[in-house]
Image (cartoon, coloured by chain):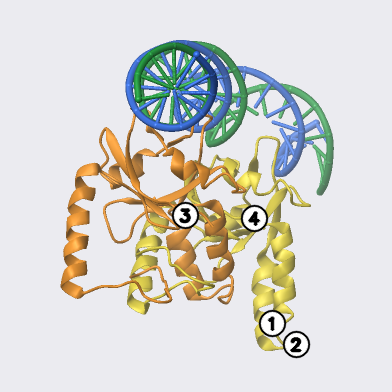
Chain colours: A orange, B yellow, C blue, D green
Amino acid sequence: MALFLSSQINRLDKKGRISVPASFRVELTNEPFRGVVIFKSNAHECLEGFTWSYMQSISERLDDFNLFSEEQDDLAASIFGSAVQLPLDGDGRIILPQNLIEFADLDEKAAFVGMGTKFQIWDPEKFNQRQKQARQNIQKNNLTIPQKNKGGIND
Amino acid sequence: MALFLSSQINRLDKKGRISVPASFRVELTNEPFRGVVIFKSNAHECLEGFTWSYMQSISERLDDFNLFSEEQDDLAASIFGSAVQLPLDGDGRIILPQNLIEFADLDEKAAFVGMGTKFQIWDPEKFNQRQKQARQNIQKNNLTIPQKNKGGIND
DNA sequence: CTATAAACCATGATATTCCATAGATATCCA
DNA sequence: TGGATATCTATGGAATATCATGGTTTATAG
């Protein structure tokens, strides 16, 4: 299982190319697909990145729903429909599609932020603010890490 | 198992020809039949696309219903009855039959939407609305992906 | 023979690969 | 320890390949 840690700011060129941090790339070496899966965050003005095999596991879990159920359809349309599959080039870069760049309001630089099994891509400015806000929320609500994380696509 | 991701809008010419996205085509390389199976969606004004081998697994799943039950009969009639097997031409295109084009109300363009193990074909406009609706349903009903061990796709 | 469908080509646009360089980091040996 | 050398990383630009798409020719069927 991939583990994405720490954050790094890299440059986004006019073609939309950007280097994936080397520390993230080593987490991808054992993946069946040499690249990442990106889509728009539901919660923030940023992008979310996953490994191919993680998407596969989501797909398998989704198959536990009745094949033509409404629930299955809603989830699949929302998750897989908006995701894009970005291969790494020979130099460890991906090309972000224009609509994703706009969604995350990225300029010349973008921050890769490790989040464990996933990572996020932020405009550096916005991420600073987000981090401040996150710290405040944690203090205010006395948040801790749950013993066992039951996750969903909403928080 | 094939994994269809992301969505892409392609052009439908007057002969009913349309390119299957290249990223979808690579998922078909290991299939016994070089093409896709398409039929009318029961839930939406769109078409559903499967691989040949996945159709086989659907057939098996249908057998889990009582073999002569009404449900089995209805599903089988609606799925297998309207399904067509569309081979890829040398350039990676399929030819959509006219009745399917009309059913999905397709015009000059059509969106291929990855849904994990299957995909859908939509009029681009209609899919936009559908995606909004899907997101609302997810929030309203608090839908999550059935968990295996841990982690959702959002925080 | 005619109409219809299938295979075949041609071509811009786009995406991918390849190469070069500079800076940072790590390695090695005296 | 220090300094030289090699390696890795990020980044820019150019060459190359692929993709989507329209048209044309060839096969097929009635």
Question: x, y percentage for residue A21?
Answer: 41, 39
Q: CA distance from mark 1 to mark 3?
A: 44 Å
First of labels 4, 2 by sequence position:
4
Disc 4 target residue: B2
Q: Is residue B108 visible?
A: no
Query: Do callouts 2 and 1 mark residues in contact (Cβ within 8 Å)?
Result: yes
What numbered label is drawn on residue B72? 1
First of labels 1, 4 by sequence position:
4
Find numbered disc 3 in the image and state the secondary structure of the residue it sits on.
Answer: loop
A96 relative position to B3: left or right: left
Query: Do callouts 1 and 3 mark residues in contact (Cβ within 8 Å)?
Result: no
Q: Tell me the kind of residue under disc 1.
A: Gln
Q: CA distance from mark 2 to mark 1?
A: 7 Å
What numbered label is drawn on residue B68? 2
Q: Callout 1: residue from which chain?
A: B
Find residue B140 and report its image quarter. bottom left
Question: Is A98 or C20 nearer to us in this picture?
Answer: C20
Q: Residue at x 51, y 32 (%)?
A: A89
What numbered label is drawn on residue A3? 3
Q: Callout 3: residue from which chain?
A: A
Q: CA distance from mark 2 to mark 3?
A: 49 Å
Closer to viewer: mark 4 or mark 2: 4
Establish whether labels 3 and 4 are both on one chain.
Answer: no
Mark 2 neighbour density, 10 Å: few (under 14) some (14–19) many (20 or more): few
Answer above or below: position of B30 versus A108: below
Establish whether labels 2 and 1 are both on one chain.
Answer: yes
Q: Residue at x 17, y 52 (%)?
A: A129
Question: x, y percentage for residue B73?
Answer: 70, 81
Closer to viewer: mark 1 or mark 3: 3
Closer to viewer: mark 1 or mark 4: 4
What numbered label is drawn on residue B104? none
